[in-house]
Image (cartoon, rainbow, N blue to C red):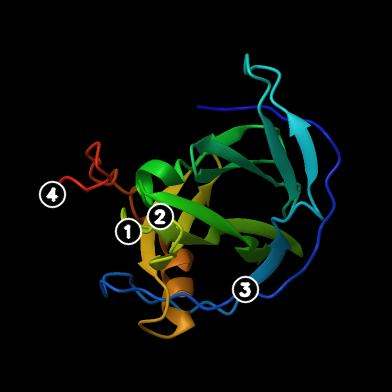
Amino acid sequence: MRLSISGPVAMSTLLLAGCSATDGNAPARSNAAIESVFTDLGPGSCTKEIDRTDPNETPYLACPGVAGYTLIVRRVDAGRQSIDIVDAAQRGFPLGYQEFVTRHMSTLSEKAEWRVEKRDGKQVPIALIVRMQAREDADDPEKVTRTYCAVAKIAPDEACVTDRLTEGAQPETEVRSAADSARERPCAPAQPPMTDDGAVVR
């Protein structure tokens, strides 16, 4: 699915707290040509837009990226947010965090980390890392039970979530290794569905 957006965006550089892999399956790869660029997802640096294709005219945030990219932060369900990656050609790629990271209520951090390669002096995004605070306790829906790092690959004609990593178990370098090799792996499968009482189907 591809979307189109318009409206001004401006870049803001911030620090991103560390995240780490828990399953140990993310391959490590060292490449000095790959570096991080941090951008803001908060309302102070993003432009509020209206989705005119939505009968409810739902608002969303158009946030700055790198190399002409934009991130669309939108509400996708009650208590849930996700991101669309929009490239310089205005092609949109919804990441579907509510399906591929967690089906529970969650909120995004106000920071995003791009992994970019330098090619002929230009920045080329290859992956995106965004932290998500999940609320997985049905008895206490306001409690943040876990923070995930959503890793998405960015290819010329595709963007999708490849890894769901949990913050705090291993060094920050693990999640960056997963991001740096994300193009070599398939898109992640959807998370198990939830029952009406908020339990995850196993």
Mark 1 vs 3: CB contact within 8 A? no
Mark 2 vs 1: CB contact within 8 A? yes
Q: Residue at x 37, y 60 (%)?
A: 164
Residue 82 falls left or right of residue 138: right
Residue 66 lies, with reference to residue 95, above or below; the image says below
Q: CA distance from mark 3 to mark 4?
A: 32 Å
Q: CA distance from mark 1 to mark 4?
A: 16 Å
Q: Say whether disc 1 or disc 4 marks the residue closer to the N-terminus.
A: 1
Q: Residue at x 66, y 41 (%)?
A: 87
Residue 11: give x, y in percent of width and height: 81, 57
- Which structural element holds mark 2? loop
| Amino acid identity at mark 1 | Asp
- Which structural element holds mark 4? loop
Crowd band around label 3 with a 10 angstrom C-alpha radius: few (<14), some (14–19), many (20+) = some
- Specify the label residue 137 is tagged with: 1
- Specify the label residue 16 is tagged with: 3
Residue 89 lies, with reference to residue 185, above or below; the image says above
Q: CA distance from mark 1 to mark 3?
A: 26 Å
Mark 3 vs 4: CB contact within 8 A? no
